[in-house]
Image (cartoon, helix red, strand yellow):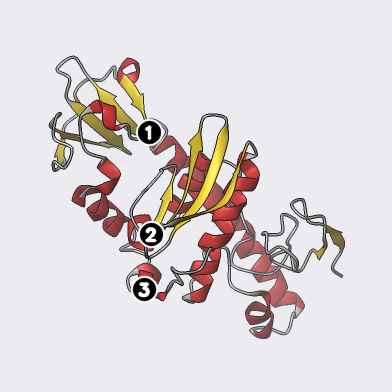
Amino acid sequence: MASTGKCPYCGSAVRSDEQSCPNCGAPNENFVAETERQIFLPKTIDELKAYCAERGMPLLRMRFFIGEDYREPRAFGIYRDGDEFVVYKNKSDGSRAIRYRGPDEAFAVNEIFAKLLEECHNRGIYPDGKPTGEALARNNQKTNVRRSFLTGLIFFLVFGLVSLSANRCAHRKDGYYQFNDNTVYYHYGNDWYYTYTDNNVGSWYETSAPTEDYDDYYLGDSFDSDWGTSDFKNSEMWQSIQDDNSSSSSDYDNWDSGGTDWDSDW
């Protein structure tokens, strides 16, 4: 039997068998259902990046910019501005609608995460698990089926946590670096890329590790135009990486950003 609790974001009553709050649409932290996987709720920008990377989401194609103040039309995004977090939508005409600006990172991340899931669900993609009704309709809740399912679910969750942990470790030192030759590099997973400085629209190229001891040369993961180089995450190389990451998940292959209502405020 479903229990009833309160939504941590708006205070409305929400049952444990509801995936999201019926009032504000926020994902339900206490959701329990027999789905392929339970909802994982990222509460920081870094956790949201890891969530998307683990699922192979081609964020550039999806027009979601996590941790970036992207200024071109047709984009959703979140970034940190001093002590505040900003969640925004850039409309088709280039104007910007601010969904949230404030100090609560968890709330800001939830806003962009809910929109990300909404855009996926509108295209029949369920990174958070398929709807409860579909799962329940596929079986009669017989004891042997339930036991098999629970065994598989436990294995899946353990495997998912191990995979997510490994992914986070692999990408723990992602970001921009600048070494003694002033060349700016980007480290992603186990790979290195570089571009020439004083070339704000330049191409990025794959290269070998500049040095084994590179922690002291870290600039950050958020791009700064003062470095005199181009943004790696707006490059063709980055798009190619995202396409490769999503190749194993055909759900995203036909993603068309034209299916989004870019004229509304959110």
Callout 3 amino acid: Gly
Which residue is under mark 2?
Answer: 63
Q: Which residue is mark 3?
A: 258
Can you give x and y, in whole percent of width and height, for residue 99 in the image?
57, 53
Q: Quadrant of residue 56?
A: bottom left
Q: Secondary structure at mark 3?
A: helix
Task: Classify residue 73 as left or right of residue 1.
Answer: left
Q: Closer to the N terminus: mark 2 or mark 3?
A: 2
Whole-percent x, y for residue 17 in the image: 76, 68
Give the mark, 1 or 2, whose residue is nearer the N terminus: 2
Q: Residue at x 51, y 61 (%)?
A: 116
Q: Residue at x 33, y 74 (%)?
A: 254
Q: Nearer the viewer, mark 3 or mark 1?
A: 3
Could you tell whether 108 is left or right of 76 in the image? right
Disc 1: CA contacts within 10 A as few (<14), some (14-19) or many (>=20): some
Which of the pair 56/120 is nearer the observer?
120
* Residue underneath mark 1: 221
Spatial separation of the CA atoms under disc 3 and disc 1: 29 Å
Element at badge 1? loop
| Picture quarter with the N terminus | bottom right
Residue 257: which quarter of the image?
A: bottom left
Q: CA distance from mark 2 to mark 3?
A: 10 Å
Residue type, mark 1 in image: Asp
**200 vs 245: above or below:** above
